[in-house]
Amino acid sequence: MSTHKKLVGWKAIAAYFSRDRNTVARWARERGLPVHVIPGGKQRSVFAFENELRDWAMRNFGNDTTTDETAAPTPPAAAVPLAPAPIPPRPESTGALPPENPRLPARILARLRALGPGRRMLGVGVALCVIGGASLFAMGGGAEAPRSAFPQGAQASADFIAARDAWARRTPADLDRAIQLYEKVIRAEPGFAPARAGLAEAWLIRREYGAVTDARAYGAARIAAQKAISLDPGLPSAHRALGFIDYWWDNDPAGAVSAFQRALALDDRDGQTHFWFANILADLGQDEAAERHYAQARLLSPGSVPIAIEHACAQWQAGRDQRALQLLEALRAQHPADPTIRNCLSWVHIGLGDMAGAAQAYRELATLRREPDLLALSARLDAAVKQDPATAHRVLIEDARREIALGTRRIREVPAFYASAVGDRAEMLGLLHEAVLLGERWYSQSVTRRMEAKWRHDAEVTRLLRQLRAPPPRLGPL
C-alpha cells in the first residue's frame, strides 16, 4: 500500500495549492493535473496524491510564477523536499520526466491571464480566412469588418510569414522558431488573431517531435486558440485547433466534430482542416468519411508529406494492415529523416504482434528525435525483445503507466491494446478493470474493434470492453 498522503475531494486539492476549486479543476482539465476519479453516485469523487501534485507543480511551473492568471501554485513548505521524491505510488513507475523550460514571455502571459476558460465564442457574422503556408486571404461576411490577412506592421508581417514557413517544415528547430516568431508577432500586435491560432498549431505539432510533454503543449495551445476565438470568432484555424485539442487530449469526440464542422462551415477550402478532420474520423472508425476528407486535403495541399503519411497510417486504422505496411515502407525509403513514419510503423508492427519490428521502428524513431527518454525506452525495448519477445510489450505498458501517473497520458486504451495485440490476457484485464473503475470512455474504434475481434469469445473481456467503448458522436453530413 502506498504511504503517500492522499487528498480526497476538490476542496482538499484546492487547499493544497491555496487556490479555489474552479482553478484546480481547470488545471486537471486543461493542464494534466494528476487527479484520479472514482465514479459512483450523482457526483464522481476525486482524489489526488500529494507527491504527484508537488511534482506536477515543479514540472509545470518551476520558479516561474507568471504562467497562470494568478501566481503559480506553491505547495506547502513541508511538502517540498530538497530533491524530487519518487513518483508516483505505482510500483511500475520508472521516475519522472525531466523538467521543461519553454515559457511564454511575461508580456504575452499578462495578456493571456485575462482569458477565461470559455469555449467556442461563436459570432453571428461569419468571415472567411484561408491560411495555407504563407498565403492568406480574407473575405468579410454580414456586418463584420473584413479580416486583415497580415499584421499591420511590416516587420510583424515578415515574422508572421516566416513563422508559417517554419511551421510547414516541421523540424524541431523550425517549430521552436515558429513559436518564437508567433510570440514576437503577438507582442507587436496583440489583437491579430491569426498569430494566436498559428501559435496554437505550432504547439500542437511541436509535441509530436519531443522535448515537450503533451500536458504542456496542449495547455499552451488551448490558451492561444481560445484567445484567437475571443478576438475573432469566425477564424477557422482557431476552431480547428480547439477541435484537435478536444479529440486528442480531452477525449471529447463530440466537441471535436463540432469544432471541425464549424471550421469547415467557415472555410471548406482549407486543406489543413480536412486533413486533421480526416485523422479524427479515421480513429473513430469512420473510414469512408475519412477517405473523402483525405482526398480533399490532398487536392488542396498537393505533395504534402504529412498527409501522405497519415493517410497511409489510416489504412491500418481501417484494418488494411498489409496495405499500410507497404505504403509506410515506401514512404520510409523516400523520407528517411521523418520520425512520424516510424511512429506509424510501430503501431502496425504491434498490431501484428511483431515486437521485433516494433522495436526497430522505436529505435529509428528515437535516433531521429534524439530524445533521452525515448532513447532509453528504445534501449529497454531492444533488451526485452532480445531476452524474450513474448514479454517485451510490458516495457511499453510500464512506460504508459508512468505517463498516466505523471498526467501526460489520460486513459489506458493504448497500453491495453499493447497487451491485447500479443495475447497477454492477464495484463490486459488488469488495465481494463482499472479503466472501468475510473470511468474511462474509449472512442478509438481503430483500437477497440481489433481488441473486440481478437477476444470475441472471451465473455469477461467482451463485457469490460462494452463498458469502456463509447459510441461515436453524431456526425451528421460529412
Image (cartoon, rainbow, N blue to C red):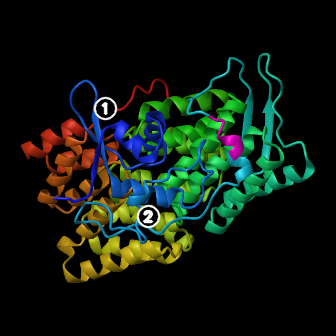
Q: Residue at x 59, y 64 (%)?
A: 101
Which kind of residue does numbered mark 2 sit on?
Answer: Asn
Q: Residue at x 56, y 45 (%)?
A: 275
Q: Is residue 425 magenta?
A: no
Question: Circle 1 sits on which residue?
Answer: 471
Q: Quadrant of residue 116?
A: top right
Looking at the rendering, the stretch of residues picked out in magenta corresponds to 110-115
- Label 2, label 1: how far apart the Cα atoms are: 27 Å
Residue closest to the eye, 309 or 156: 156
Measured as percent of width and height from the top left, residue 378 is found at 37, 76
Q: Residue at x 64, y 35 (%)?
A: 115
Tell me if residue 311 can be seen. Answer: yes
Q: Residue at x 13, y 39 (%)?
A: 463
Q: Is residue 185 above or below residue 59?
A: above
Badge 2 crowding class, 10 Å Cα cut-off, few under 14, some 14 to 19, many 20 or more, is: some
Q: Is residue 114 magenta?
A: yes
Tell me: 160 left or right of 208.
right
Q: Is residue 399 above or below residue 161?
A: below
Q: Earlier in the sequence, mark 2 or mark 1?
A: 2
Quarter of the rendering occupied by the N terminus: bottom left
Tell me if residue 296 can be seen. Answer: no
Q: Secondary structure at mark 2?
A: helix
Q: Quadrant of residue 240?
A: top right
Residue closest to the eye, 227 or 107: 107
Measured as percent of width and height from the top left, residue 29 is found at 44, 40
Question: Circle 2 sits on which residue?
Answer: 343
Which kind of residue does numbered mark 1 sit on?
Answer: Pro
Measured as percent of width and height from the top left, residue 105 is found at 70, 55
Q: Is residue 168 above or below residue 112?
A: below
